[in-house]
Amino acid sequence: SGPIIETARTPVDARLQTLTLTTPALPAPTNVNVLLPDGYDSSGQTRYPVLYPLHGGASSYRDWVKNGGVEAATAGLNLIVVMPDCGLAGWYTDWFAPGTNGQQPKWETFHIEQLIPWIDSQYRTVADRSGRAIGGLSMGGFGAFSYAARHPDLYVAASSWSGALNTNDPPQLAAETIDAIGALAGAAPGSLFGPRATEEIRWRGHNPWDLAANLRGMLLQMRSGNGQPGGPLGGTRVDGLESEVHPMNVDMDARLTSLGIEHTFDDYGPG
């Protein structure tokens, strides 16, 4: 159905399967982890809501299973969890220009226009906005709020964990950081959203802070620390990336508050 071709479906355990898919939107095959609820096969015509957790930079679709405890966290829940890949640093966007390897992946096209309808055709999902939520970590937190704000008809809830929620804060640093992370995935400076100096509108058109009004009416959660050592988990070092995204979360909280948009902001301090 549609442009996606499934080339493999590998059972990992009783609930988890790994899909290998090809699509014209991406230069190479891509993997998706799908976690089904207990008893899915014997539950007849029951339909389930779907959560799409997005991984962070320098990571992959495996992250939520390997490091995120997703199987334990969703045990016993009537929920399908779909964990797509976005390359080491695809930034949940259709790239503005080819990277250093000549490749120009269209991650947003794949995730939004292709994967969602394909998942809805392959699994017994609640295939409308009321049954679809998105969340993400770091780069994936950006992706979750950017996708939700750019496609508010698709999601009833969005969560960001240490997300890069305001790429204007400050614009040059954000652009340099994103380009530096993007280089891990073969992006050249400006490959992802275009050069900041000439493509301001494109940057802002993907930036959750600028699109915040579109999130009205969703169940919204943001959770972020400040990157300092200590806290309940007892970190011993300063986390530079957490320190960098923390002011973005403070910005986003203020923006949502000024717009009168209900949300939860767990600003948990060190750790």
Image: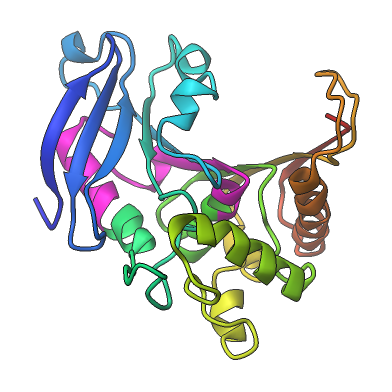
The C terminus appears in which quarter of the rendering? top right
Q: Residue extending furthest front?
A: 101
**Residue lying at 56% horizontally and 86% vertically, measured from the top left:** 199
Image location (x, y in percent) of residue 197: 65, 88
Residue 59 relative to residue 246: left or right: left
Identify the residue at horizontal 78%, vertical 67% (top origin): 169
Q: Nearer the viewer, residue 241 or 187?
A: 187
Q: In this view, does 122 lie to the left or right of 159?
A: left
* Residue 131 falls within the magenta-colored stretch: yes
Q: Determine if residue 126 is in view.
A: no
The reply, left or right, for residue 50 in relation to residue 67 is: left
Q: What stretch is highlighted in magenta?
A: 114-142
Residue 168: x and y, percent?
73, 71
Camera-nearest residue between 192 and 205: 192
Residue 247 sits in quarter: bottom right
Point out residue 8 in the picture as x, y percentages from the top left corner.
13, 33
Q: In this view, does 143 lie above or below 179?
A: above
Q: In which quarter of the image is residue 175?
A: bottom right
What residue do we see at 19% from left, 44% from top? 21
- Relative to 204, say whether 159 is above or below: above
Residue 40 figure quarter = top left
119 sits to left or right of 4: right
Residue pictured at 53% horizontal, 16% vertical: 73
Q: Can residue 117 be seen in this view?
A: yes
What x and y, as percent, mark residue 23? 18, 56
Q: Note whether 224 is above or below 169 in the view shown.
A: above
